Structures are given as structure tokens and as C-alpha cells.
Image (tube, rainbow, N blue to C red):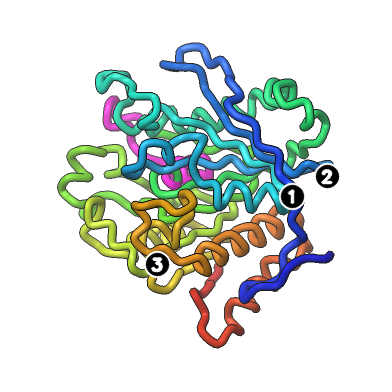
Amino acid sequence: MSGSTHPTGTVSSPTPVLSISPVVLPVPGRAVDLEVRVSAPVTGSDLPVILLSHGQGHSNHLSSLNGYAPLANFWAAHGFVVIQPTHLSSTTLRLAPDTPGAPLYWRSRAEDMQHILDRLDLIEAAVPQLIGRLDRSKVAVAGHSMGGHTASLLLGARLTDPLDGTEGDLAEPRIKAGVLLAAPGQGGDALSRSAAENFPFLSTTDFSEMTTPTLVVAGDKDTSAHLTVRGADWHTDPYFLSPGPKSLLTLFDAEHGLGGISGYDVAETTDENLERVATVQRLTWAYLRSELYPGDSAWQEACDALAAGPSPLGRVESK
């Protein structure tokens, strides 16, 4: 396999990317139709799929199908079809604050991904260049921040619905692997007062049933004081509190933006670092390659390369 080298290993050679948006999916009962962006390599067949869930943040458009270009473009250029929904929590939709599920729509966000998987035929029809090119048996989910919470639910994490006390079980068996980027940790006493009051669904997060193979990515300077009293280690909870197989990539000196993954030159990125973004791009790609294609050596090679560097940008541990 030809490709490019980097302190985190070799990746396949990039190909041009086709990106189409918005692809509109009607969803009965949803406040508005579900809009998605689809990014894919212009060549190749039997392409695996990544569902990418956006976070929130202060920018107007990153919390939508228009965010996370550094990840979506990289993954698509290296062989994945990336599908990005605009969740109801997006600032671009400006839904009324009394819309059911507001403000973060934790359940609807996970259901969006299930709707996408239910409607892959519609997506292919809307993007004729994709027809017959998807491998529907190889689906992964990734999410940053609140998107990481969404992804964790699809991977098997659970919570107690604060509205009716029922268990929120949104595990999606069609998803075979996941990547959690700066995702929320456990609730209870770990939450800040404002998070407990404003986002009560975070209070009961339980990772004990999150059995799907997952890479957790956390920055060791991501203190997220608005959400937790614990500090940066809170974002490692999805790794330590869930059963294996799991891997944890801890990025040194990284804050919540993980170097700038939510967009190019984003003002709210407090730790902008191109090498850090490249590390996230390449290790997440390598992890998903090896999880979806057993026997693929990309993940081991990436881990070895990261550890062998003179000044590693992070460390990996697995269980």
C-alpha cells in the first residue's frame, strides 16, 4: 500500500473527495427534516461508513453538517464515506427553546444516526456517484464533545431519562466500532453544578454496557470546568468505566479542541496545533481500519510510530 509517512505511521495515498450537501431525509415527527453532508472518495468500492456527530461550541456553523472538515475530509480522502447530520441542537436551526428535547436533544441526536442507517438507499439515490459503493456491514460512529456523548449511546452507554425515569438504551448493532473525541464522562458528583442543572441527562451516564470496540481520545489539558469538577481525566471515563476491547489515546497538552478538529482555523480552538490534528486524523483512521478489517496492521503501526518518536504527541493504552 503506497502512502505518506508521519510520526504516527503510514496512511494510504489520498484521493480526491466528493462532498454533497444538503441531502435531505424526511423523518416523520422530527421538528425539521434531517439534513446530512456526504463526503466520499471519488474512486473505490465496498467503502466503509463513518457517521460523524458534531459537538456544540460557540461558532454558528460548526455545530452542523458544515463542521469538522479536518476529520471528514481526511477520512474520506483515505477510503471512508463520511455522513454528517445537522442535529436538532445545531445553532443553525434556531429552533424554539420549548421544542421537545431542547436544548441538546440527546435522544434525537442518537436517533438521527439510526435514521441515516435506515435510509442509506435514499442517500445513494441522492448521490448517484455512491450507488453500489457502500459496504453496509462496516459502519463506525465518531463524535466530538456532545457528539461524543451521542456516539457513546450508540456504542452501548446508557442513562436514565430525566423526564420519565426510563432507561435510555440506544445501542445500535449495525455500528461495529467507534471513536469518542473529548466525550463527556460519568455523571453524579463528577458534574459541575451548572451541568447538573442544565443537562440532567448527563447525571446518570453508565458505560458498563458500552461493549462495542471504541477508541477514546482525550486531551490531558481538557479541564472542561463548565461540565465537570474532576478535570481532564473526566474525559477518559468512557475508557476506564467500560468493558474491553477499548483503546485510549491521551494527547499531551491538548485542550477541548484537540488541536483544531472542529474546523479549519476555528477561533474557539484554544490549543491550535496542526501536528496534533494530524495525529488525531491518522490514529483515528488507523484504528477504524483495523477494527473494521481484522488483520489490517494500520493501528499497530500507528501506535508503534507514535511511541517511537523523539517527542511523542501522546500515548496509547488498550484493554
Identify the residue shown where x is 70% and y is 46%.
Answer: 80
Identify the residue at image location x=78%, y=63%. Answer: 295
Residue 309 showing in the rendered view: yes
Precedes in sequence: disc 1 or disc 3: 1
Of 175 and 87, nearer the camera is 87
Q: Which residue is mark 2?
A: 44
Task: Please state if 154 lies on the left or on the right of 256 as rendered.
Answer: right
Measuring from the top left, give residue 291's x and y in whole percent: 68, 56
Labels 3 & 2 near each other (Cβ < 8 A) = no
Quick one: SS at disc 3?
A: loop
Observer-nearest of 107 and 56: 56
Q: Quadrant of the C terminus?
A: bottom right
Q: Position of residue 57 (x, y in %)?
A: 34, 44
Start and end of the magenta stretch? 148-166
**Circle number at residue 79:** 1
What secondary structure is found at the residue carrying circle 2? loop
Residue ID at (53%, 45%): 155
Give the residue type at disc 1. Gly
> Are circles 2 and 1 on residues that touch, CB within 8 Å?
yes
